Image: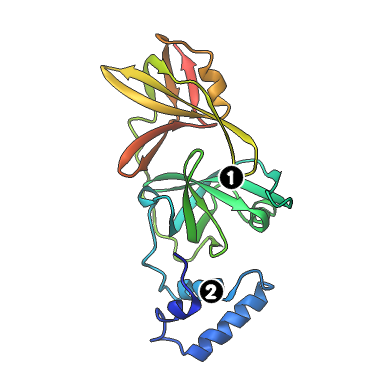
Amino acid sequence: MHKSKEQLYQQIKDIKSKDEFEKEIKQLQKEYDELFDEDTAALLIVDQLGRNKQNICKIKELEPRTECTVFGKIINISQLRNFTKKNGTKGRVINLELTDDTGKCGLALWDKDVELVKNESIQKGTNVKIINGYIKDGFNGIEINVGRWGLIEIEPRDMPETKKEKPSEDSLIKGKVIEIEPTRAFFKDDGEFGFVTNIKLEKENEVKQITIWGDKVKEIQKLKKGDNVVIEDIDVRQKNGTKELHVNSKGVIKKL
């Protein structure tokens, strides 16, 4: 839950007077052309002073409907999408993929934040810090959104060192198709249609359920029960302590 500037000041009152705090809030708002409110400016000041530690999460720890500060590296950037909001105004969104040494998740940049990609401030390989991002259950798994009280810091000075993640044993699976669920359609946040289905593969007397997204659903529709397949670049995610297997645009599905 977002904190007011008064609540945030309590975290730094031992190192900064209230007057100094208020002056810095006004100065920060001026520097950023009043793009965010006093509470957001206060959050940025507290974070820069290293006092916003309690909400820092690793990707594997993210839970829907919470707010967290997350460090990560951008590893994939989708195309810009324009759409019409319910109130009739125009909106823009770019979906990115973020990784740390515990996993991967989605990152959605909306409206003004889209410029960070357009002007190449954010590219593949860029390290970012999402301050107070809102976590939701997106169409491709866990997703971070930078909302009204969220901020993005590019190449943060306090970026932690990351250990190279070992590939999951489930990132590549060979098996026999034993079930293909009917395809489901849904509306995305930008008003466009999306598609998803689930399949089950039998691998050495073990059954693996895999969720298939987007264009990869078309490839699944060409398969039938009993086909042997290999699926590569499976996105392995943790949700509520349970491992989930997803195939998105980066996945490879081959019939054997």
Label 2 neighbourhood size at 10 Å, few (<14), some (14-19), many (20+)?
Answer: some
The residue labelled by disc 1 is: 95
Query: Dot 1 lies on which element?
Result: strand
Please state which of residues 228 and 89 is positioned toward the viewer in this rendering: 89
User: Quadrant of the rendered structure where residue 178 is?
Assistant: top left
Residue lying at the far top of the rendered structure: 226
| Mark number displayed over residue 119 | none
Rendering coords of residue 255 (x, y %)? 47, 13
- Picture quadrant where residue 54 is located: bottom left
Quarter in which the N terminus is drawn: bottom left
Q: Position of residue 93 (x, y in %)?
A: 64, 48
Residue topped by disc 2: 39
Gap between marks 2 and 1 measured at Cα:
26 Å
Residue at 48% across, 17% down: 254
Q: Amino acid at mark 2?
A: Asp
Give SS at disc 2: helix
Q: Residue at x 44, y 44 (%)?
A: 104
Give the residue at x 39% y 63%. 55
Whether 14 is drawn above or below 93: the answer is below
Q: In the displayed structure, would residue 70 be above or below residue 96?
A: below
Residue in the image at 55% along x and 52% along y: 126
Quarter location, residue 211 = top left
Q: Tell me: 86 left or right of 256.
A: right
Task: Please name the amino acid that badge 1 sits on.
Answer: Asn
- First of labels 2, 1 by sequence position: 2
Nearer to us in this view, 120 or 209: 209
Q: Position of residue 175 (x, y in %)?
A: 36, 16
Give the number of marks: 2
In the picture provided, is 241 more to the left or to the right than 72? left
